[in-house]
Image: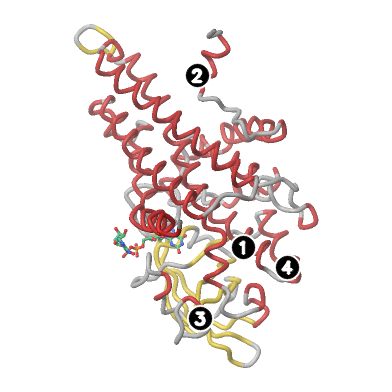
Amino acid sequence: MATAANQMEFNAGHRVAPWMSEEHAQLADMVERFFAAELVPNMDRWRRQGYVDREFWNQCGELGLLGASMPEEYGGSGGDYGHDMVIFLEQARVGDAGWGFGVHNIVARYILNFGTDEQKQRWLPKLISGELVGAIAMTEPSAGSDLQSIRTTALADGDDYVINGSKIFITNGQVADLIVVVTKTDPNQGAKGISLMVLETEGAEGFSRGRNLEKIGLKAQDTSELFFENVRVPRENLLGGAEGMGFVNLMQELPYERLIIAMAALGATEMAVRETIQYVRERKAFGQPVMGFQNTRFKLAECKTRLEVMRAFVDSCVQKLLDGRLDNATGAMAKLWCTETQCEIIDECLQLHGGYGYMLEYPIAQLYADARVQRIYGGTSEIMKEIIGRALDAD
Ligand SMILES: Cc1cc2nc3c(=O)[nH]c(=O)nc-3n(C[C@H](O)[C@H](O)[C@H](O)COP(=O)(O)OP(=O)(O)OC[C@H]3O[C@@H](n4cnc5c(N)ncnc54)[C@H](O)[C@@H]3O)c2cc1C
């Protein structure tokens, strides 16, 4: 039987997911309060300036958010993937898509999973404290989906590698201090020639950043072109110490990375539905609240139903991730379905706002602008279908 508590949970969006432990739930409460105080009031200013203040990164470091899932020996909190998922969800639930924690978190995870002991000691504590902000540079002007055809090279020369080439669309590109650069150590090979080089940007000669690219959304997130002209990095900066492992390493983390994007889709869609319900209750047309029209209730009923289906799928994927069972095709399905559905629902919600929905001062307009790229980065929807399609063939 429905109780008042059930009803509140229905409206609030079941914040405590089935995969959450008591600790995850406590983290969610803490992060919700912290974002309300320190993120939400700054979002407009960060959108105008085009990047998130470094002080915010440092605050997140102090609170333990940057190392929530990192081992304690490197200064982390010793949690699991679920702790990071809690943070991604809370970020999206307040409508933020600017703070580039997803990418930063992925950089730390590459170093933890594939780095040598020396590399972990050297970089993880600083990534966890916020002293270093991370970026990952794969995409090039002439190679995005087709990653194997990248042209940036890192050729051995004495005790160094020398990097030449350029990257584009790099999140955190303006602010990053530590960039995992996807390079070819053997330009004659495809995937087997790919290696991950870790570049410390401070004082790196021959390294430069292009302008902060202007985008239709994600205004608070800096996105850049990066240039490498005979940039020397010591051999110790080859991630994991062995050449040719880059592509394999990138593939291993993909299901997790795609689930981060699906989680962001869930949080943003939840906010869109919540904001729209509130708006149509207050807005009047033909002498009644817009919520009074059957069309509005039907549209919102559909949106809410699809939102809850999305949540159930994401929750089941997080559980698989925690159990070490999240496969590549399921990760791709999560990204594909959640981001496509996010865009459809947010579009419906914007429509219910009428002209006000097109005005950037309304959160729904921001959500609309931010949502579009979700179907492109981290692998496009078409590439997700390729991955899922190939898995069908494998059975
Ligand atoms: C805001 C933003 C942030 C980003 N952040 C980063 C980052 O931090 N690091 C990074 O390395 N990259 C980043 N990217 C790049 C992003 O991952 C790529 O844009 C994306 O992978 C697509 O590559 P592309 O732009 O070169 O498009 P293309 O690969 O040129 O694709 C063009 C079109 O062709 C389609 N297509 C391509 N191949 C196939 C195929 N086999 N079958 C069917 N259709 C196909 C695509 O789906 C797409 O519709 C970011 C991009 C944006 C916009």
Decide if residue 138 is on the left or right side of residue 64: left
Labels 3 and 4: the sequence-earlier one: 4
Read off the residue under disc 4. 122
Read off the residue under disc 3. 193
Q: Amino acid at mark 3?
A: Gly
Task: Report the front residue among 161 and 320.
Answer: 320
Give residue 392's position: percent from left, percent from top. 41, 54
Read off the residue under disc 1. 110
Q: Amino acid at mark 4?
A: Arg
Counting every numbered tag in the picture gives: 4
CA distance for labels 4 and 2: 46 Å
Disc 1 residue crowd, few under 14, some 14–19, many 20+, Cα 10 Å: many
Labels 1 and 3: the sequence-earlier one: 1
Task: Report the front residue among 66 and 296.
Answer: 296
Q: Nearer the viewer, mark 3 or mark 4?
A: 3
Disc 3 residue crowd, few under 14, some 14–19, many 20+, Cα 10 Å: some
CA distance for labels 1 and 3: 18 Å
- Marks 3/4 in contact by CB < 8 Å: the verdict is no
Read off the residue under disc 2. 10
Q: Is mark 4 within 8 Å of ligand 1?
A: no
Labels 4 and 2: the sequence-earlier one: 2
> Which structural element holds mark 4?
helix
